[in-house]
Image (tube, rainbow, N blue to C red):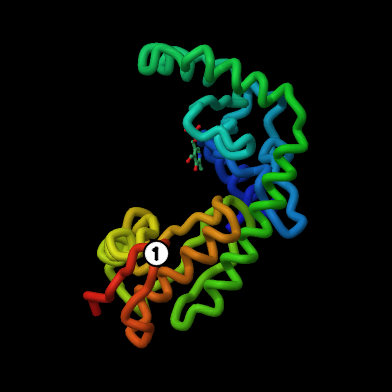
Amino acid sequence: MVYSDEFIAGVVELCEKRSLYLIMDDTYNRLVFDGRTPSNCYRFSKAVNLNSSKLVVINCVSKMYAMTGFRIGWTVAGKDVVRAMTNIQSQETSGPAAPSQWAAVGALNGVQSCIESLRLTLENNRNVMINRLEAFPGVKVMKPGGTFYCFPDFSAYERDSQKLSRLLLDKVRVVTVPGRDFGMEGHLRVSYCGTVKEITEGIERIKWALDPNAPNEMFLGDRKIVRDWQ
Ligand SMILES: Cc1ncc(COP(=O)(O)O)c(C=O)c1O
């Protein structure tokens, strides 16, 4: 779910009242749907300037420029916080590789329409995924307001999300992340980052694997899969 402005304003107010640091991970803030605009926590701050603020906003090239693996991000925060972060990072990682840094500079200074085009693709993929999941008997799913994941509840079929995830990988070659890792047994995290064809194919395979009344055989490409599980 995407946090509302009211929610973020409330968290900022609470943190500032209690003198707590607030770290806002804005990694997906440009990939939001249904006409939403990204929220900016600094709008709600009562601090006189950035250096006296305890807000720490982080972001990266990973998602909005589809540059996962480059591992380049940035922080907007007061000088003292940034200095402390720099000290720790320079000792821990010796700094990110120069080619990754230059690639990030290229992304940030390049044509920005790629972000909107990615966002539109993901919004369409989200709609395809949600339509398919809503038509999946027994599955409950909340429509995500952004990102490229959704988190359907498969507990009507199997409560043990690790077991279910393993079954889908082994039997029908669909990768999911068990909800247990997010504190939500019975759920699976599925991504709609791929093509519409991959999304529909993935859901069809899951359906076939879980439906005891489905035909006993299915073809994955030219490989025949025979059901040998309940
Ligand atoms: C919410 C969130 N923040 C930060 C990151 C970090 O991205 P990276 O390490 O690729 O820069 C990710 C990546 O999965 C993410 O999902």
Q: Nearer the viewer, residue 96 or 135?
A: 135
Asked if ligand 1 lies within 8 A of label 1, the reply is no
Q: Can you see residue 64?
A: yes
Residue 211 against residue 179 in the figure, above or below: below
**198 and 97: which one is in front?**
198
**Residue that appears at 59% across and 47% down:** 11
Q: Is residue 79 left or right of residue 187?
A: right
Q: Residue furthest bottom?
A: 213
Please tell me whether residue 177 is drawn above or below residue 92 in the rendered image. Answer: below
The amino acid type, in three-letter code, at marker 1 is Leu
Taking the image as drawn, is residue 55 in sight? no
* Numbered disc total: 1
Give 197 or 49, whichever is nearer the viewer. 197
Q: Element type at marker 1?
A: strand
Q: Quadrant of the C terminus?
A: bottom left
Q: Is residue 151 left or right of residue 148?
A: left
Q: Position of residue 35 (x, y in %)?
A: 77, 56
**Residue 52 against residue 119 in the figure, above or below:** above
Residue 47 or 118: which is nearer the viewer? 118
Q: Which residue is mark 1?
A: 220
> Residue 48: which quarter of the image?
top right
